[in-house]
Image (cartoon, coloured by chain):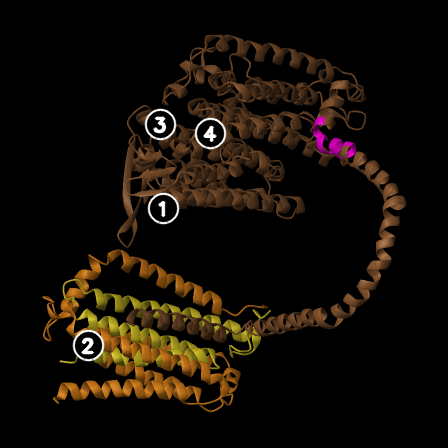
Amino acid sequence: MPLLTFFINVFVPGKFTRSGFCAIASIAISLLCSLLIFIAMWNQPFIHVQTNWFTIGSWSLNVGILLNNLSVLMLPLVSGIALLVHIYSTKYMQGDPYLHRYWAYLGLFCFSMLGLVIADNLLLIYICWELVGFSSYLLIGFWFTRNAAVQANKKAFIMNRLGDIGFLTGIMILFSQFQTLDVISLFGEKGLVGNAIVTGGVWTSGLHHMPAGWLTFAGLAFFLGAVAKSAQFPLHTWLPDAMEGPTSVSSLIHAATMVAAGVFLLARIYPLFNDTVLIVIAATGAFTAFMAGTIALTQNDIKRILAFSTISQLGFMILAMGVGASASSLFHLGTHAFFKCLLFLGAGAIIHEMAHLKEKTGLDYDPQDIRNMGGLRKYMPVTFVTMAIASLALIAIPLTSGYLSKDAILIESFEWAEGKGGWYRLVPYSAMITSWLTAFYISRLIFKVFFGKFRLKEKVGLHHVHEAPPAMKYVLVVLSLFCLFPVFSLNPFMFEDAWVIQGFPQADNMTRINAFHTVVPAAVNLISVFLIYLCFLWYGSNKPAPDFSKNGLFKFSQQQWFFDKAYNTVFVAGVLSFSRFLYQFDLIIVDGIVNLFGTIGRGFARISDWFDRNIIDGLVNLIGYLAGKLGKLIRKFQTGRLQQYLVTMLLIILTLFIYKYYTAAI
Amino acid sequence: MNIEQIVFYFFAASVLLSAFMVVFIKNMVRSIFLFFVTLFSMAGLFVFALADFIAVTQLIVYVGGMLVLMIFAFLLSSKTILNKSEVKESNLLGLHHIPGLFIALLFFLILFITIYQANPDQLSWVNNSENVIQVNDNTIHFIGVNLMTRYLIPFEIISVLLMMALIGASHLARREKKI
Amino acid sequence: MIPLAHFMLISAALFCIGLYAVLSKRNAIMILIGIEFMLNAAILNFVAFGKYDKLHMGGQLFALFAIVLAAAAVAVSLAIILNVYTYYKNIDPTVIDQLRD
């Protein structure tokens, strides 16, 4: 079995070839291998193969492959979606002059993602983590001639660097505490983290101990890494901008796999988190989910809607991690990967057609704006059906996979909040509202795009629009199969029966409250169905668009989006009028007093002016002069001459050597 | 003082002397030929360290290959390099020589002190070593066996690297239309 | 029998001559020669200590590899020097100072 994983590692870098077929073949082989591994390894004891990488002093770093349920679940998920996206890209990216570069980047991404999944060592995970971020940077900026793409990839890279700092800090803290980076010995059943004791504000493990605050700090640092990678609240802004990349890339990286890396990391190091960190995680997840849901309501760019929806769903996963439902979180990760990938690919097909239409008719409009679409149902039936299935899964309608996973998260968060009480209940309620919002925005998208009239019809004939090419069509169909419940569980209503959930240890600190198991899904679904119907009324009918913008609810959701603008008008206007009043007050009363003081002060001022000019200015000028001289002196070192650099370097080394040597000798 | 020592110190003196000459002589062509002498004497020193194969390799690779390559590159490229290279270098104590000279001397001082203190001839693993190469040993046999067993991977990597350097060098040196 | 210390002294002297050449020569080819001196000094040390490792031949084989690597380095750096010459019409390293602020 380790041999097979080794084959994966060998085959995946083999994709750095010019042809897309090579890429597809190799990713197919790795999918096959990972499926084999998956069948052989699921619910088996983990396999851990190590080899010595390097030795520093008496400490040696072992690296290897770790296959437990978590990683064998991710392996076919990543490679399967990657395969479908590869097939899709053959058509989508057809004719691009830099196609081989695209394949190479995709190959690099798949390799690093698979490496991240099977790595058994925090350092190795970090390396793959960086590689994943780097390949995402390359792919976002794939159309590097566009200014927006370059800005977006810079933004994504910098945001991810912020997270990496957190990750690295966490690694360093753990290393200084436990002297190892091995995942198994840290987080295994009898791992060091589990055995470390927190007593009296001291965090003890074996001979090493440090203040307990460091435990929280390490947890928060790791979480910061996950926040950046999974686009959570403070650092989420890179993901919508990342939509500048090709749509197939957005679907693979920014919906299905890479953003899930943060959740994956949280799952790997789960035992590290203490209660404080878990609450932070849950709150961040809930807030992000809610915020992104409200923003998605009023966006008009089809990809941006999906991007905010992704952020919102990732918020759900993080929330689930925070409330201790790691199994449901991973389950949602799997199901979300499929349906969100499908949504993106469907959107890609639509954009593809709209762009073609634009080329043929010569009109100038944005092919990604849903206000320009409509009535596409008749022309792209397969895309319509598959995207509708994916949206239903996203809304979590029964009989879809999303129902199982999302309701699992909702129910478990309710149970968690029931155990805690108080303000903690905000978390599940906001999650529930978010899932209603989800229903609204995604059905708005579907209805606007596929129902009603084509909004550019008066200008162009629709006969140019037709179904996506077969390579794209069949991928959509395959993905939509994965959105249905039988793939994950035979019982469409009970999430506990899903095999993914059963493959992970259940969180035992929660009491099962049966009421939630019926009330929550029912409430979610009833209101969701109602919202879908509402959407249909508003956006699905043939009435022209301006009718909806007068609707109060629409305005309300628009104000949600301009939340900060509303703040601006209320507060800034208030402050301005208040300050005008103060100004008047100043002018009349305060100024009178001030003027009085002023005349007295002027006398003092004359004296101090003289003092300033001659003594203080002199000092300041002296300092400025010295700084300028120093700068000029330092500037002279930057001669650009290699030999002088070499001389300086050697001189410093020699000085240090002599200093160390003779202080040691004496 | 027996004949072995005399020959050894002769070679050592020739190495150091010719190296000095290489560095301080002004004519480029002469100093490159003196470099040849240095390398030749180095090969002689290798023989005294009982490494005859290394000495032969030194002669073949350095003297036979590299030096010829250098002189060819030097002479074939253009005459202007030759002319330019004979810029009049200021004398030994010129301003720009001082830092180099200072650091080199300091380095030598430190190395000298370190060698003196380390006293390599009294190291325990040197004195107690079981497998010292004898004068009449056939080192080539050992080198061949080790190269193909213990050091096989470095050997392969080196060969690939050599090929890469070859391709890279020829790519860099090819005459381009415009730069 | 030549003492090890003498080998080391010779190599130290050669190293310092090479260092001087690298640091203060006004000609890229002379700098290259200086680098070769330093490499040779290192190789001499390897060989001298390799005498005490008959079984594995660590020192001598390392010296062998170093010689080969030096040959590769010289080939590449000569090519670079030629390119620099065609670009700047000069091989004086003090003239090539585009890294200056």
Residue A176's tag is 1
Q: Quadrant of residue A350?
A: top right
Q: Quadrant of residue A586?
A: top right
Q: Chain of mark 2?
A: C
Residue designated by label 2: C4
Name the amino acid type tagged 2: Leu
Q: Colour of chain A?
A: brown
Where residue A592 appears, as percent x and y from the top left, is 89, 49
Q: Colour of chain C?
A: yellow
Residue A69's tag is 3
Name the amino acid type tagged 4: Leu
Side of A224 where A534 appears, left or right: right
Task: Estimate the spatial distance between the alpha carbons at disc 1 and disc 3, rounded to whole Å.
Answer: 29 Å
Residue in the image at 75% along x and 69% along y: A611
Q: Colour of chain B?
A: orange
Sequence order check, earlier mark of 4 and 1: 1
Task: Estimate the spatial distance between the alpha carbons at disc 2 and disc 4, rounded to whole Å.
Answer: 64 Å
Name the amino acid type tagged 3: Asn
Where residue A315 appears, as percent x and y from the top left, is 54, 28
> Which element type, helix, strand or loop, lies under badge 2?
helix
